[in-house]
Structures are given as structure tokens and as C-alpha cells.
Image: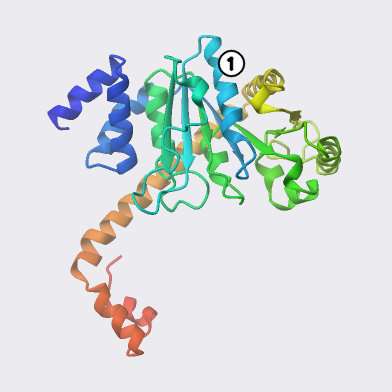
Amino acid sequence: MKPREVTRIKEFFDGSVVALARIISHIENRVDGYEEILSQLFPKSRNAYRIGITGATGAGKSTLVDKMAMEFADDGREIGIVAIDPSSPFTGGAVLGDRIRMKDLITCDNVFIRSMATRGSLGGLAAATKDVMVALDAFGKEIVLIETVGVGQIELDVVDACDTVIVVLTPESGDSIQAMKAGLIEIADIFAVNKSDREGADIFVRGLQSILQIKEDNRYSSSESSEPKWTIPIVSTIAHRGEGIDELLMEINNHRQFITEHGFFESHRKMQIKHKILEIIEQHIRDLIEQKILGETDIEEIADKVFKGDIDPYSAVIELNIDY
């Protein structure tokens, strides 16, 4: 490890917010040596509770995160926020920068906000999100809130990254059956129906309740009748007024207690570690392919031959005679 990185890690553990920001930039940009930095941080990163907030664009996720974080911060908790934004087509950076809608948190010394660009990641979370969570955890953050970009598709990666997943819907989301079709019930630990002062909110909530009663199984259920079951709560919120936030935080605590008492927290964290190990292996294999195979192969030339019809892509790869 370079002397500058050693110094930065020391400053990090001394509580330097500047060092934290720079280390996160190294992680996000995959600067050489970032894995060595993470190996130093990981042993100190087993304390933060991770809460994911996902849902369609315009559901009010940022305002909801803002109010939730304020409540946690007022209790004296150390809070980290990772807000995943679409990538700028010009810079590749996060479009919304430092989340201008989270203006209430600017003056909170115990809250650290980081915007990250998706950079082509399709699941709503930037590829480096889980590594950034490690940094925030190691820095001493007790609660890490992850807001996804809201791409309107099944965001299974948020389940893998978080301990509690909140799916934010609005009355304008349409028929509650659409929530089931979109796979949201499979990933939700808690539903927050935001903007619940709007017309049709009560009808929407009742429809969602009916769907949840019919579809009793969720990711904590099993075929064994004796197994503990988590009943997914629906919390009505009006985020910009701060209404429903206390109830939402209470349900988060209830879910945390449930998964801890019944062993789901431990098993889920072990699964996350397993996935991370496989992810690191896959990345190393890709790096090896780029260095050992693609580095000695003119892919442009092969692509040109395939385009002209001189060869097909499958035969082209066979002809590379790759030694697996």
C-alpha cells in the first residue's frame, strides 16, 4: 500500500470526514489499490444497520429519507446516506450531486450524504454501493440508508445489500395488483404509501392489504407452519409534512427485532458475504481475461470478420484456443 493511502486510512480512523470522502471516491472510481483499502476497513464494518429505500421515480423517496435521517440524527445516531442517482451523459457523475432535496440534513454533523451514479448498473444500485457501505460502517455510522435510483424494475440488488427494504408507493402507482406483478412484494419488508393525502390513497392501501393477505408468503416464510412469519406492514406517509415517519421507524425497529431474534439477520449477512466473495472472484476473472486474453487479441479485427460474414462469433472464440 502506498504511503499516501496509509496516511489516508489513519486519518479515516481518526475521524476525518475528508478522508472518508476521498476513500469513497477511490472505491467508486475503482482506483488502483482500492481493494487493499477495503481489506483494512472491512474488519471494522460489522455494526451498521442497512436500510434500503426503493420505488418508482417521483414517489418521494428523497424526502422520506430526509425525514427518516433527521429523526435518527435527533436521537444522536451516526447516519450515512448513499443516494443512487442516474448518471450524467456528459460527466458520468451523479445527476443530482449532493441531493439538493435533502436540505434539512446539511447542518447535521452526524449525517454524511454521498451521491453515486449508476454508471450503467441496471438494478438501481451502483456497482460500488456495497463497498461504500463498508466504508461508512467502518467510519462509525450506525445506520446506513440506501436510496435507489428508482428505475421501475425489480431491484433485487437492494435486497442483497440491505437488512430492511422499504418499498415506496404512491396512490398514483395504480392498481395494487401491479405492485405484485412488478415483484415488489418479494423484496418489500415494509410498504410506505407516500403522498397519502392524495385522492384514492385509502382505496389503494386497502387493495394492497388485500393482496398481502392473499399472498401470505414472503422471503421469511417457509413451508413449515411452525416457522416464524413476518407480516409486511403498510405505513401511510406524507413525507413533506413529516407525517407517518414515527410509525415507519417503529416498523423498521420491529423488523430488525424480528430478523435478529429468528436468525434471519445472521443468515442474510452470511449470504451477502458469500455473494461478495463470488463478486470479487468474478471481477478478478474479468481482469484476467482482459490482461491475458484480450490484451493479446485484436477484438476489433475479429468483430470486423464476423460483420463481413467471414466467421461466426462462436467459431472465432474457439479459434482463440483459450486455455481454461
- Quadrant that contains the N terminus: top left
In the rendered view, does 110 fall on the left or right side of 262?
left
- Of residue 40 and residue 211, the one placed in the foreground of this image is 211
Q: In the figure, 299 relative to 101: above or below?
A: below
Residue visible at 83% across and 37% down in the picture: 209
Residue visible at 48% across and 18% down in the picture: 142
Residue visible at 79% across and 49% down in the picture: 177
Percent across and percent down for residue 3 are 13, 28
Percent across and percent down for residue 77 are 50, 13
Element on which disc 1 rests: helix
Farthest residue toward the left? 3
Percent across and percent down for residue 203 are 86, 39
In the rendered view, does 42 fall on the left or right side of 31?
right
Q: Is residue 228 visible?
A: no
Q: Is residue 87 visible?
A: yes
Q: In the figure, 209 relative to 293: above or below?
A: above
Q: Splitting the image into 4 quarters, where does residue 248 fall? A: top right
- Quadrant that contains the C terminus: bottom left
Residue visible at 29% across and 18% down in the picture: 16
In the rendered view, does 186 fall on the left or right side of 156?
right
- Of residue 191 and residue 103, the one placed in the foreground of this image is 103
Q: Splitting the image into 4 quarters, where does residue 322 fall? A: bottom left
In the rendered view, does 155 fall on the left or right side of 100?
right
Q: Residues within 10 Å of mark 1 (few under 14, many from 20)?
A: some
Q: Amino acid at mark 1?
A: Glu
The residue labelled by disc 1 is: 71
- Of residue 95 and residue 114, the one placed in the foreground of this image is 95
Percent across and percent down for residue 289 are 28, 61
Number of numbered discs: 1
